[in-house]
Amino acid sequence: MPAGDSHSSHATVASTPTTSKPAAQEDQQVHRETSARQQQQSTRLSSLIKKYGYNIAGKIYDGKVWKGMTAEMVQDSWGSPRKITRVVSDNVVKEEWFYRNTWLYIQNNILAEWGPVK
């Protein structure tokens, strides 16, 4: 280019190369993470099967809830609620468990009702 040309190039070359993982290393990392997740899921399912039997464990593993399940089964399915309100009267324990979008009504450790959080 002629001197004084406004389109003259002033490129610089980096003296140290950028460090990025080669595609094969990234693929291996993703594979390891996926394998670890699958192992955790398999271990969780095996544990649920030992605890509840195959049919119930499959439902709990899939995150389902139903009337008549125990409070422990609910926690195994959905995890711990954000909030629990409890009223004890005579020999009856009434609890409302609040999850993100749903409340559950548990009476004497058995799931009786549920509905959307308003």
Image (cartoon, grey):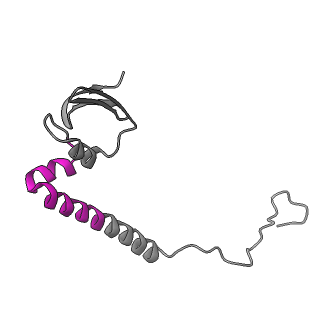
Q: Is residue 63 visible?
A: no
At a point 23% along the width and 41% down the height, the residue shown is 71
Picture coordinates of residue 13, whole percent (x, y): 74, 74
Picture coordinates of residue 102, whole percent (x, y): 31, 30
Task: Please tell me in which quadrant of the rendered image residue 29 appears.
Answer: bottom left
Task: Please tell me in which quadrant of the rendered image residue 86 appears.
Answer: top left
At a point 57% along the width and 72% down the height, the residue shown is 20
Q: Nearer the viewer, residue 13 or 79?
A: 79
Our reading of the magenta stretch's main secondary structure is: helix
Q: Per the image, is 62 magenta?
A: yes
User: Residue 25 vs residue 81: left or right?
Assistant: right
Q: Which residue is the extreme one toward the right? A: 4
Q: Which residues are magenta?
A: 38-64
Picture coordinates of residue 118, whole percent (x, y): 36, 21
At a point 16% along the width and 36% down the height, the residue shown is 66
User: Residue 9 vs residue 80: left or right?
Assistant: right
Task: Please tell me in which quadrant of the rendered image residue 25 appears.
Answer: bottom left
Q: Nearer the viewer, residue 88 or 106?
A: 88
User: Residue 1 vs residue 76: left or right?
Assistant: right
Residue 31 against residue 96 in the figure, above or below: below
Picture coordinates of residue 113, whole percent (x, y): 20, 27
At a point 32% along the width and 46% down the height, the residue shown is 79
